[in-house]
Amino acid sequence: MSGKILIIDDLHPAFKQKAEELGYHVDDLPKITRAETMAVIAGYEGIAVRTKFKIDRELMDAAPGLKFVARAGAGLDNIDEAYAKEKNIQLINAPEGNRDALGELAVGLLLSIMNNFRKADIEIRNGVWDREGSRGWELKGKTVGIIGYGFMGSSFARKLSGFEVKVIAYDKYKTGFSDAYAQECSMEEIVKHSDILSFHIPLTAETRQMVDEEYLRHFKKNIFFINTARGEIVNTKAVLAALETGKIIGAGLDVLEAEKFPNLSEQSWYRELAASPKVLLTPHVGGWTFDSYRKISEVLGDKLAQL
């Protein structure tokens, strides 16, 4: 096996090491810009990326010899999948590498919002001791509804197995996936029974803005809401409205419709979101731990060997 691979993002050295063992020449250039990449990509058989920029039609057209794109992460929404398929460019990703990190973060968000950790911590630091106002809810006996039962949804379900909850899961593209950790169900059952709702689906044309006011209105109970998937699947204003009415009791959001500053602060809903004591925010770190940094590259290396 031979050929050249360009790494344009910060990847753990395990991927480069594995690629070189397979006979590839690897240029590890995590600081390279898009313009610089466009100028040299014609000489490469593979490109490895995390989130730096989109691997789109323009870039693929500039790389006639490109055979594969290695995405160091779970989602492929920063790659034009349809055009890659048209050009016979193989896509490999590594959801196996960060599923544990994501599952643990989702549990952490859930426990935090159910027990008012953020509110209590801020109040104590400001001289307020409000025991009654910080009273929380127990997970035991609750029904957790999971939307999407791939690597991430199933990891979340496994992490919940010691909490004595009932886990139900809906996946539009899978059937027969009930296991020891979750029971397959319909969307109707999700909206009827869920006390907690957690999203683990990719961003597609179909899922973009899927969670809007009408979607949330169907839920029979007031719910705790977790999103560690992609921010664009959720209409943030709809979530804020549901928090206002109490339909959503608390929300843990690792992903947002707009991310990074100053883009985030320019959104019309940002100030209200940031001011809400019922919301816990993290900067898209689900799946991004010191451990997953290494595991993702190891998984990518293994998959490269199978091409």
Image: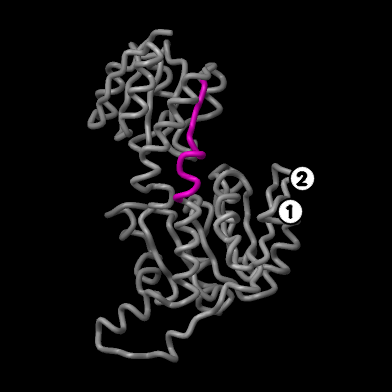
Above or below residue 54? Residue 265 is below
Q: Give me the residue at 52% from left, 17% from top.
A: 307
Horizontally, residue 46 falls left or right of residue 212, namely: left
Asked if the residues shown at circle 1 and circle 2 are in contact, with their CB atoms under 8 angstroms apart, the answer is: yes
Instruction: Please report whichever mark, 1 or 2, sits nearer to the chain's N-terminal start.
Output: 2
Q: Picture coordinates of residue 35 (x, y %)?
A: 26, 26
Image location (x, y in percent) of residue 64: 42, 11
Residue that carries the numbered disc 2 in the rendered image: 176
The residue under the point 43% across, 25% down is 301
Q: CA distance from mark 1 to mark 2?
A: 7 Å
Q: Amino acid at mark 2?
A: Gly
Magenta span:
90-101
Residue drawn at the location 39% of the way across and 32% of the way down:
297
Location of residue 143 (image quadrant): bottom right
Question: Which residue lies under the disc numbered 1?
Answer: 184
User: What secondary structure is marked by label 2?
Assistant: loop
Q: On residue 43, which mark appears?
A: none
Residue type at mark 1?
Glu
Label 2 crowd (10 A; few <14 / some 14-19 / many >=20): few
Residue 251 lies left or right of residue 247; in this view the side is left
The colour scheme of the drawn protein is one colour
| Residue 221 spot, x, y in % from top left | 66, 75
| Residue 99 shown in magenta | yes
